[in-house]
Amino acid sequence: MAKATSQFTCQSCGLVSNKWAGQCGNCGEWNCIVEEGAAAPVSGAKGARMPKGRPSRLVPLKGESPTPPRLKTGIDELDRVAGGGFVPGSGVLIGGDPGIGKSTLLTQAMALLANKGERVIYVTGEEAIAQVRLRAERLGLKDSDVLLAAETNVSDIIATLSEGKPPAVVVIDSIQTLWSPVLDAAPGTVTQLRAGTEALIRFAKQKGTTILFVGHVTKDGQIAGPKVIEHMVDTVLYFEGDRGHQFRILRAVKNRFGPTDEIGVFEMSDKGLKEVANPSSLFIGSREAGTPGSAIFAGMEGTRPLLMEVQALVSPSTLGTPRRAVVGWDKNRLSMILAVLETRSGIPVSTHDVYLNIAGGLRISEPAADLAVAAALVSSLTGTPLPIDAIFFGEIALSGAVRAVGQSGNRLKEAEKLGLQQAVLASRSELPKKSGLNIKSLDDLGALAAWIATLS
């Protein structure tokens, strides 16, 4: 038998090499390469033939397969993001910053499922059993029939889950603590993460158990570990939010059984996380009339229309290079909007500091927010308050033209439902046949600036 050798694995991207280096040649990260034991090579592997395989049974694409019902937790916002509930036999990875509320949300969900008679198991690798019980007591869930285990050995976890009736849902908190004694690598390394996840997902597929993995995130906001972990699971959810705000956003970025880019909104309280059924009313409910630099953006998060406040502050700068500070939006897109405002509309912003914030700790990635951002910037620069009952949405081209965006009808319906009266959008937008809003159509940024000037 040939002797086992060591290999060096990047903890960021999973690249394997035969020597150590300070920087990974694949992903460019520094100090991320760790020495791990490699499995002993098969004797005589050089020139050896692959063993003869067994042919698999082929079936036609046309046909019917039984679809198991989705498992609803009873938390509507969580079920919404999962696509209507969890699919039996699926693997779900939930990531988020420390202390954001991942364990709290899963404890609440497991308690609701246990109260429905489902067999649920919560496996913790970071806390003691007493600590989990303290959290459940704080949430008022200490009498729930949730089964607990404090274990990190993958083999022992699978042996525990295999006893008796297969559980409906299993929580692994967290995936970074898993380890297998057959691998010569420390817990949290790429080798251990890959092997532990693969073994548990195999168990989930065989037994029809839904496994929820809790994952840590890096300083860049990405789930720690190689991307292969996200490829192995069926669903990836990100739990995000600002600790300075009470709102938390659960966002689906991958879902094999449902839509992606769907969000669920929660509010953190002393009794745990509470669902926010109508987040638009919360995000725009505290606006002050007569304040320049504030505009309401009608956005879409998955299938849900969501109104949010865009705040801008433009002030003269004494610096050679004016400051640009952005919270909740793309800084590069702000630079583009400022360049278009000055070049195409003659609005002087190059000598001003610009601060942009999305209220409530939300993050916007839609190009449809361009018009709301431009309106807030012009409003702050001129000191002209925008109508408090108006919404803005539209994409801005480099030529200064305002382009139409999709799902205009849903955006307008959400604004009308909350009692708003006006909508400012592109002139070529598809409008519903009946709308109670006063529509203001714009062709370019010059028309936007001229309209704001009439408000003063």
Image (cartoon, rainbow, N blue to C red):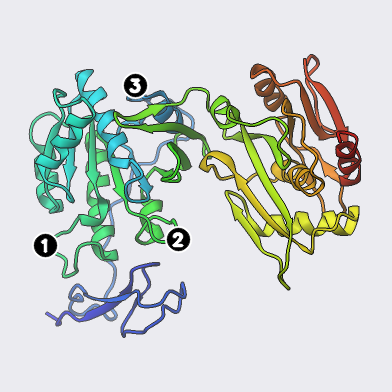
Q: Quadrant of residue 271?
A: top left
**Is residue 100 found left or right of 37 in the rendered image?**
right
Regarding residue 427, the answer to whether it shows in the image is no
**Is residue 235 found left or right of 360 in the rendered image?**
left
Q: Which residue is mark 1?
A: 181
**Is residue 132 found left or right of 283 in the rendered image?**
left
Q: Amino acid at mark 3?
A: Gly
Q: Is residue 273 above or below residue 6?
A: above
- The reply to whether callout 2 and callout 3 are in contact (CB within 8 Å) is no
Q: Is residue 34 above or below residue 230?
A: below
Front position in the image: 159 or 351: 351
The residue lying at 77 percent from left, 34 percent from top is: 386
Q: Amino acid at mark 2?
A: Asp
First in sequence, mark 3 or 1: give its number: 3
Q: Gap in Å between the C-alphas at discs 3 and 1?
A: 38 Å
Q: Where does residue 274 sit, x and y in percent of width and height? A: 38, 27
SS at badge 3: loop
Q: Where does residue 250 sit, x and y in percent of width and height? A: 44, 38
* Mark 2 burial class by Cα count in 10 Å: few <14, some 14-19, many 20+: few
Front position in the image: 347 or 19: 347
Q: Which residue is mark 3?
A: 74
Q: Quadrant of the N terminus?
A: bottom left
Q: Which residue is mark 2?
A: 220
Front position in the image: 319 or 372: 319
